[in-house]
Amino acid sequence: MLALSAAMGACTPQPQSSKERKLDAVAQSSPQLEPLPPTPPSKTPRARVASEGDCAPRYPNGARGTCINNQPCRGYGVRNPDGKAVCTCYGRDGGCAEGQRCDGMRLTCVPQKEPLLGRGNAE
């Protein structure tokens, strides 16, 4: 059995060294270039509005929302083009839904019980 496997190994083609192989450094076809999609227009950041009053929601992890126009805001206040204060969370006008909070690290709404980054679970 050993002699058979030794004989089979002698019959297997050995890989050529890189010096013996003829490598072609030039591609055989041209690259397929496609145009890039158009760049979306940038949005000008809106001026932030300070929270006023004591209606800001409190979250289980210790964070707080804001109070905009005497209404609880699960986000922060900004001025709309008409100059009126509105609640938003990084482009989501109206702020986050019930059970969510606006997360400044992720720049979106997250479940309100989700811990702040780098901290333990909220109780």
Image: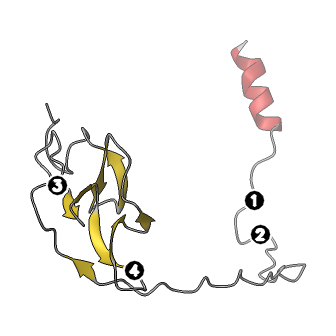
Q: Earlier in the sequence, mark 4 or mark 1?
A: 1
Q: Nearer the viewer, residue 73 or 23?
A: 73
* Helix, strand or loop at mark 3: loop
How many marks are shown on the rendered structure? 4
**Residue designated by label 1:** 16
Q: Amino acid at mark 4?
A: Asn
Q: Amino acid at mark 1?
A: Gln
Tell me residue 4's x, y (percent). Answer: 78, 19
**Residue designated by label 4:** 80
Q: Could you say which quadrant of the image residue 67 lies in?
A: bottom left
- Measure how far apart labels 3 and 2 are at the Cα level: 75 Å
- Measure how far apart labels 4 and 2 are at the Cα level: 71 Å
Labelled pair 4, 2 in contact (Cβ < 8 Å): no
Q: Nearer the viewer, residue 61 or 31?
A: 61
- Measure how far apart labels 2 and 1 are at the Cα level: 6 Å
Labelled pair 3, 4 in contact (Cβ < 8 Å): no
Which mark is drawn over residue 20?
2
Tell me residue 49's x, y (percent). Answer: 22, 77
- Measure how far apart labels 3 and 4 are at the Cα level: 20 Å
Q: Is residue 120 above or below residue 47?
A: above
Q: Earlier in the sequence, mark 3 or mark 4?
A: 3
Q: Nearer the viewer, mark 3 or mark 1?
A: 3
Tell me residue 85's x, y (percent). Answer: 30, 75
Q: Earlier in the sequence, mark 3 or mark 2?
A: 2
Residue at screen point 17% across, 49% down: 118
Q: Is residue 123 left or right of residue 112?
A: left
Q: Nearer the viewer, mark 4 or mark 1?
A: 4
Q: Earlier in the sequence, mark 3 or mark 1?
A: 1
Labelled pair 2, 1 in contact (Cβ < 8 Å): yes
Residue at screen point 79% across, 68% down: 21
Q: Nearer the viewer, mark 4 or mark 2?
A: 4
